[in-house]
Structure formats: structure tokens, C-alpha cells
Image (cartoon, rainbow, N blue to C red):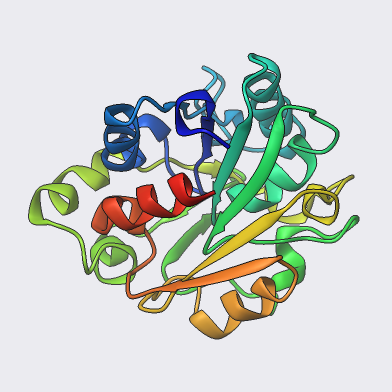
Amino acid sequence: MEAARMRVVFVHGACVRDGSWWWHRTAELLQERGVRSVAPALPSCGEAGTPGGTGGPGLAEDVAAVRRALLDGDEPTVVVAHSYGGIVTAEAAAGVGAVRHLVLVSGYLPEVGQSLSDFGDGTPAPFLDVDPDAGTFGVRPDLLVDTFLQDCDPDVRAQAADHLARQSVQVLGQPVAAAAWQQLPSTYLVCTRDRGTPPPLQREFARRADDVVELDAGHHPFLSRPAAVRDLLLSL
């Protein structure tokens, strides 16, 4: 795939907003090589103007938003899905002819019928705050840096809290209706210093991918090691 004809669609993870900020360091390096990218908003994170929560947007709306972005162009497309973004991408990328490769970054790789809750033990992770009355969950700000950004620059750490979001708890139990990774070439990027999604769990998911790359990085390598992520994408 020639870099000049390649397009990248970034799908961000849970409990954040403004995907273009989370991906900006890698996106800028790709743009220097003539590769355009887009990071669609996820409605379940309140990015479509409707707050996330009980009765609000859930996984179906996230899938529809990403699918629209994938269909908005016919260039050969690489989808880069981070964490929860792997759940969304599994369904959103299915059957989209322009998509040539999936890259999972600490991402979930569900089978048809699986949901995010199938990969936990039934209790919230210690870095999450769940509000059952509002029907939302989010990252505890006091644990954000130590859990997810420990290897990032001070400026990234300082700005990240402004890009957190409360997300609808509905997405935890809503199953995917497709598993695009079963039909498309896929690469799994294992982040060996990730404190949010433990490397052993990542390696279990990676067994479902075609290729596996390990990187000495935390949960957000596209912020802490953007050149490495760029080089991986260009190598495809």
C-alpha cells in the first residue's frame, strides 16, 4: 500500500473525547508523509451533543459514527483502534471494501456476540468511577497519569484531563454483531508497559491477530512513542 494513497481512521478508547487530540502526535507525523487521517467522535462519550448515560447513545451509535467515517472515501484505509475502540471497530469495519488492515493498540478483539463486559471479572477496574444513577463511567482523574500516561511528556499529562469524558455504561454489556478482524488482515500492538490493559491480556487478544508487534510503551503509545506508531503504520 503506497503511503500517499493510504488513509488512516483512528478510533479512540473509552472515557475520552476529542479523538483528534489523543491521536495528534502520530497524525501530524503521518501528515508529513502525505497520509491523511481522521478520528471520528464517539456518541457514547457525549461527543455528538447528547450526554452519555442511561437512554443515551451506546455502542450502536459509536459503530454508526465510525462506519460513516470509513465509508467517506475510497482510498485504501487502515483502521487503528485503541482499547475500547477495538470493540467498535470489530463491527464498524465489517464489509467496508476500502478497509485493508486493522491495527489494534492495547485493543479488544471480540468474537461475534461478545461485549466489553465479557473481558472483565464483573467488578469495575480500580481506575474507573461508575455512577449507576447517571448510567455513566469515567476515569478517576487522580489515577489518570499513573495508570495511562506514565511515559508521556509533561505537557501531554497536563492536557489529558481536559480530554476525559463520562461514557454510557450501556457500552459495557452491548454485544458486537460482527468481527471484522476475522476477514481482514490485522496487526496487534502490545504495549508492554501498559498499566490499564495488562500485557498478558493484550497477548491473549493478540493471538487472534495475524501479526504481533511489541513496544516498550504505556497505554497511549501514539502520544509517548508517535514515531514508532507512524513507522508501524507506514510499514503496512
106 relative to 69, above or below: below
Instruction: Report x, y in % for residue 90.
Output: 75, 47
Instruction: Report x, y in % for residue 188.
Output: 58, 64
137 relative to 119, above or below: above
Q: Residue at x 25, y 58 (%)?
A: 224
Tell me the quarter of the picture where residue 119 sits. bottom right
> In the displayed image of the protein, which residue is found farthest to the bottom?
200
Of the 4 image quadrants, the one containing the N terminus is top right
Residue in the foreground of this view, choosing between 34 and 106? 34
- Residue 81 visible to the viewer: yes
49 relative to 31, above or below: above
Q: Give the left or right position of residue 191, taking residue 123 as reference.
A: left
| Count of residue discs | 0
Q: Residue at x 77, y 55 (%)?
A: 173
Residue in the foreground of this view, choosing between 34 and 70? 34
Q: Give the left or right position of residue 84, taking residue 128 as reference.
A: right
Residue in the foreground of this view, choosing between 204 and 132? 204
Instruction: Report x, y in % for residue 215.
Output: 39, 72
Q: Residue at x 60, y 79 (%)?
A: 203
> In the displayed image of the protein, which residue is found farthest to the front?
2
Q: Give the left or right position of residue 67, taking residue 23 as reference.
A: right
196 relative to 64, above or below: below
Q: Residue at x 69, y 51 (%)?
A: 87
Instruction: Report x, y in % for residue 187.
Output: 61, 60
Q: Give the left or right position of residue 104, taking residue 219 as reference.
A: right
Tell me the quarter of the picture where residue 115 sits. bottom right
- Residue 56 visible to the viewer: no
